[in-house]
Amino acid sequence: MKTIDCRGLACPAPVLNTKNAIETDDLNEITVLVDNEAAKENVSRFLGSQNFAVSTTQEENDFSVIGKKLGTVDTGSAAAEKPVTETQKIMVMVATDCMGHGDDELGAKLMASFLKTLKEMGNDLWRLVFVNNGVKLTIEGSNVLPVLKEFEDQGVMILVCGTCLNHFNLLDKKQVGQTTNMLDIVTAMQLADKVINV
């Protein structure tokens, strides 16, 4: 059993340090210490993708994420590639809750219209990634939640930046998608045939 202390580290350092530790030392058991909910979720999900049974404990503001290897590594992860199809894999990264500059009310309407119209991509729409102010579209009270939930039900993976949710103090208000980290986002960009930034 190895313990690594990732408290005080910004995303995606806790996941990268965990990845490095299990790859370098070929670990069967690991405990990762983190100090926020987003890091706990990110490290837990990463360990799960590497075929570790994951449990967590909390002591005051700190979390211990404990992973015990189950067997052969499963290559699936939040950013893993879908089975090969004839469609493109288009990733749309949304970094704002309104489209364009000038009038925020108009920008919010345009963003809602844009997200609804993404349905026209059909099966080509592969990932929706929300960062910075864009994470506000995934929280309770967002007028586009029904659209995003419909995408999720149709198999579109929605990734929501945990660092951004923490920054805006919105982690507990997220209603759709997986809380993610920069490693998952960069990996998804590598796997995508095309990335569209909004």
Image (cartoon, rainbow, N blue to C red):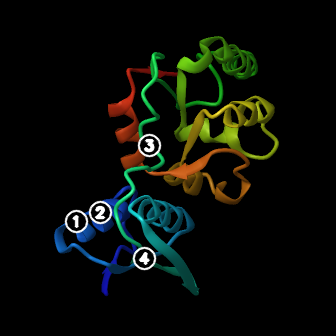
The CA span between labels 4 and 3 is 20 Å
Picture coordinates of residue 74, whole percent (x, y): 39, 56
The CA span between labels 2 and 1 is 6 Å
**What's under tag 4, amino acid-wise?**
Gly
Q: Which circle's residue, 3 or 2, is located before the other in the chain?
A: 2
Report the disc number at residue 23.
Answer: 1
Q: Which is nearer the eye, 137 or 79?
A: 79
The structure residue drawn at horizontal position 72% and vertical position 36%, both measured from the top left corner, is 153
Which residue is labeled 3 in the image?
Answer: 79
Question: Height in image: 92 above or below 56?
Answer: above
**What's under tag 1, amino acid-wise?**
Glu
Residue 137 quadrant: top right
Do the numbered discs 4 and 2 sit on residues whose CB atoms are within 8 Å?
no
The structure residue drawn at horizontal position 24% and vertical position 71%, both measured from the top left corner, is 21
Which residue is labeled 2 in the image?
Answer: 19
The CA span between labels 3 and 1 is 19 Å
